[in-house]
Image: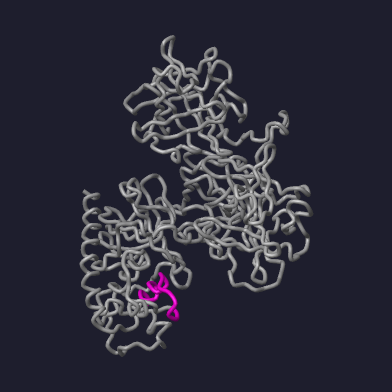
Amino acid sequence: MKSIKRLLCVVLSITMLASMATAIASESDAKALSLGDVDGDTYISMRDVVEIQRYVADLTDLSDDQKKAADVDEPYENVNMLDVVTIQKYIAQLISEFPAESREFNDSENDIQHDTDISSSSDIIDTSTDTLDTSSDTEFDTTVDVVSIKDVLSASVGANLTTRGQVCYVYDGNTVIIEEVEEDGTVNGLMIFDKEGIAGGFYELNSIVEVTGTTKLYNGSNELTDISSIAIMSKQNKPIAPVESTVSELKEHINTVAVIKNCKLGAYDSNSSNVTDATGTVVSYKPAMYPDGVTEGSAVDLVCLPTMYKDAVQIRVADKSNYMPLGSFVDTDSETASETDTSTSTDTNTSPIEITGNRVVFGEPITSLDKIVNRPVAITISNEALSAAEPNSSYAGALDIKTVEGKLTASSDCVYIIEHVAGSYLLKSHATGKYLTNNVKTESVFSSEITEAAYMSITFASDLFEISSINQERELALFIGENKNSFRWYVSTAQTSLSRDVKIYPIVSSYNEEIDTSTDTATDTTSDTSTDTSGAINANQKVYLTNNATSVDQIIGKKVVLTIKNCAVIGELSGNNGVARDIESDEDGMYVDGKAVFTVVFENDSYYLYNEVSKKYYGYKGNNSYTSLYNSICNDAMLNITYNSSNSSFLISSVVNTHELSFFSSTGNSFRWYEPNAFTDRSRDVVIYLVD
């Protein structure tokens, strides 16, 4: 029933707005427009806000007069979401005139009337939002009074209210935290109980949503339940920074995401663990597992959600990434510098992150120039990272990027700080403090001083950056060599086959990866010891299968079970054959034993199957096309994995010789590698299940 209500809400909203847009267009063409009055009805109301949002989302067009009326925030240059926020403030009577009020319009301002039916809430969503999700089928519902989160928190129990906020935390598959930021910086958080909405994908982190539900008192605080409608207003907004708090202050931040700096972790328990700082101790209820390298007694910066249970404060920790190495928490409101900074100071490395481990974890790719300055980043091309360590005189080192538990990681030698000085960019090694120059190929690669050779131009287009030397007009490119890949500077017309599409990632944390000194690291540089996830899977436990995967993206970094004909691949051998095990079922669903659980690793443009019990990689043996297990990543373990939507199955083949993983049943069930045209009666359609 709730899904039907949501669908009706979306359909009615779209229908109303479509008819509204037609009427508005005909009216606005017939008369001159006043500032803020985009639809020409002589009112400044949410109808004008909707028109601007539709224009920003490329859902409609505006006449030149409408654009001039919509551009209330700045001189007539462009129309964007800042104009939306400014009109909302005007409607709410937070401002009495528009910043662009001095511009002349054809109509007198006295002809403009306020739409008094619109909420006069003084709590406006954080104005850092400047995008509207163009893929959403939903729009603002102008017939609903929207109240602030602050008002919801103080409302009477049982009230049916509509509010808006940014999704900041999701946990337990049924609970969401949305937040708003007041003009004085105060952050208000609201708990929403909506299992169905989470399952339906309505609550993506950093999306702004409009939610209608009923207030209910839960452990002393109002929450919204019985959700009757959800509208996604925009996606991929700038994250709201967690509120800094000590343990003793957590009660002041209930249902608001917080960070406790320099706290010590107690012994891990999946039901409850203790977290202690200088002001006291708090219980972490059902916490996420500690990440590799974090144990009892570790000091971390902890991102968490303070909640109440009866009369006691407790915290929730939803993900391993919330345990951040000490000093690595970065306030997203202060981590970037102005793009227009013309300072000539070279001391611009002001990021508070402390990189103490030998590996670093990447965040989501950066997608604008103003997000790259004065923060630790990795510069990558074709899944390799530019080394910031001292390379030799002939090349700048290329470092492999690994996927560990769904996160991209690389050696801490890849970390740069990008500075913006006198209109140019500088690439500064985080470790050495030296600057990368354009003399990568033949001379000194780094300089301890800023010289002309260190000035760079960085541009961004189509989700990729381009980095070039101002002094010699050469572009940074990845050279794919037979023995070693390297970064070099080339003129734009030279060796056009070189990879030049640069991605830049923020560094969000670091950790120490133990190195196995018993092996020859000179010949085995890709061994990934971090795929051992603390022995979470044992050989004989029941492992239940959840939904089967329907794309390659869904399985990377995930624990999975590979099946053909209701049989699962087991991470052990019987002679030269890979063992097959029947899938069984009980009242809780389908299951296999732990030996069938693999983690899908993606590195160097290839896939690897890492068995969670044997701690080995599964692949082609190279002799009679049978199966083998390897202690580390090697050529024979490199795989191609593709998905065939026509039969809802995967095809897994060896990169070395294209042999395909097949099910062999004539002499007992087993898995082997066969050529595509050999033994065509073999079953090759692999169904991959995610595991619980």
Looking at the picture, tell me which residue is in the foreground, 517 or 653.
653
Residue at left 50%, top 56%? Answer: 463
Q: Quadrant of residue 294?
A: top right
Residue at left 34%, top 31%? Answer: 647
Place of residue 558 in the rendered image (x, y in percent of width and height, measured from the top left): 48, 36
Q: Can I make out residue 44 in this image?
A: yes
Place of residue 658 in the rendered image (x, y in percent of width and height, measured from the top left): 52, 27
Q: Which residues are magenta?
A: 74-89
Membership of 87 in magenta stretch: yes
Looking at the picture, tell me which residue is in the foreground, 195 or 499.
499
State which quarter of the image contains the C terminus: top left
Residue at left 24%, top 61%? Answer: 14
Q: How is the image coloured?
A: one colour
Q: Is residue 39 above or below residue 404?
A: below
Membership of 589 in magenta stretch: no
Place of residue 280 in the rendered image (x, y in percent of width and height, measured from the top left): 56, 53
Q: Is residue 590 above or below residue 85?
A: above
Looking at the picture, tell me which residue is in the foreground, 295 or 497.
497
Q: Quadrant of residue 256?
A: bottom left
Place of residue 510 in the rendered image (x, y in percent of width and height, measured from the top left): 62, 48
Q: Is residue 226 above or below residue 634?
A: below
Q: Is residue 412 above or below residue 669?
A: below
Residue closest to the far top: 667
Q: Can I make out residue 301 in this image?
A: no
